[in-house]
């Protein structure tokens, strides 16, 4: 999950398109979900801070597949060329965990 810099808000679709390209270029991604914040008032005025704008959840069959994704040229290109220039500093939130009962790793 992350927010895009205010001055780059018109480029959210570029980030989303870059995320949608990752599974095409990285077969280790078993499945994924992509979502954009609905910008509901409660999420923009929450005492803990504003919602992030984009969530990307990728599913992997095992840790090795996650590592393949993480080290792939396509992922590195996306982060360096598409995401990082537009990313609001400090807004990225991520966690890797196993979905109980499936043996599948999930990256949020």
Image (cartoon, rainbow, N blue to C red):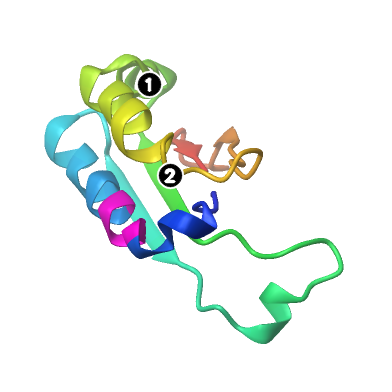
Q: Is residue 106 magenta?
A: no
Q: Which residues are magenta?
A: 11-15
Residue lying at the far left in this picture: please name it: 24
Looking at the image, which is closer to me, 59 or 51? 51
Q: Residues within 10 Å of mark 1 (few under 14, many from 20)?
A: some
Chief secondary structure of the magenta portion:
helix
Q: CA distance from mark 1 to mark 2?
A: 20 Å
Residue 71 appears left or right of 42? left
The residue that label 1 is drawn on is: 70
Q: Secondary structure at mark 1?
A: helix
Residue 57 location in percent, x, y?
A: 43, 48
Closest to the observer, 32 or 79: 79
Give the residue pinned by disc 2: 86
**How many residues crowd around disc 2 within 10 Å: few (fewer than 14), some, or many (20 or more)?**
many
In this view, the residue in front, 104 or 49, is 49
Quarter-of-image position of residue 46: bottom right
């Amino acid at each position: 999950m992350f927010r895009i810099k205010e001055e780059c808000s018109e480029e959210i679709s570029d980030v989303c398109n870059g995320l949608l390209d990752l599974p095409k270029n990285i077969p280790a991604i078993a499945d994924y979900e992509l979502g954009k914040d609905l910008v509901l008032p409660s999420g923009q005025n929450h005492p803990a801070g504003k919602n992030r704008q984009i969530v990307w959840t990728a599913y992997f069959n095992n840790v090795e597949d996650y590592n393949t994704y993480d080290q792939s040229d396509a992922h590195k290109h996306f982060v360096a060329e598409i995401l990082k220039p537009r990313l609001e500093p400090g807004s990225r939130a991520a966690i890797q965990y196993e979905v109980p009962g499936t043996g599948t790793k999930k990256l949020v």
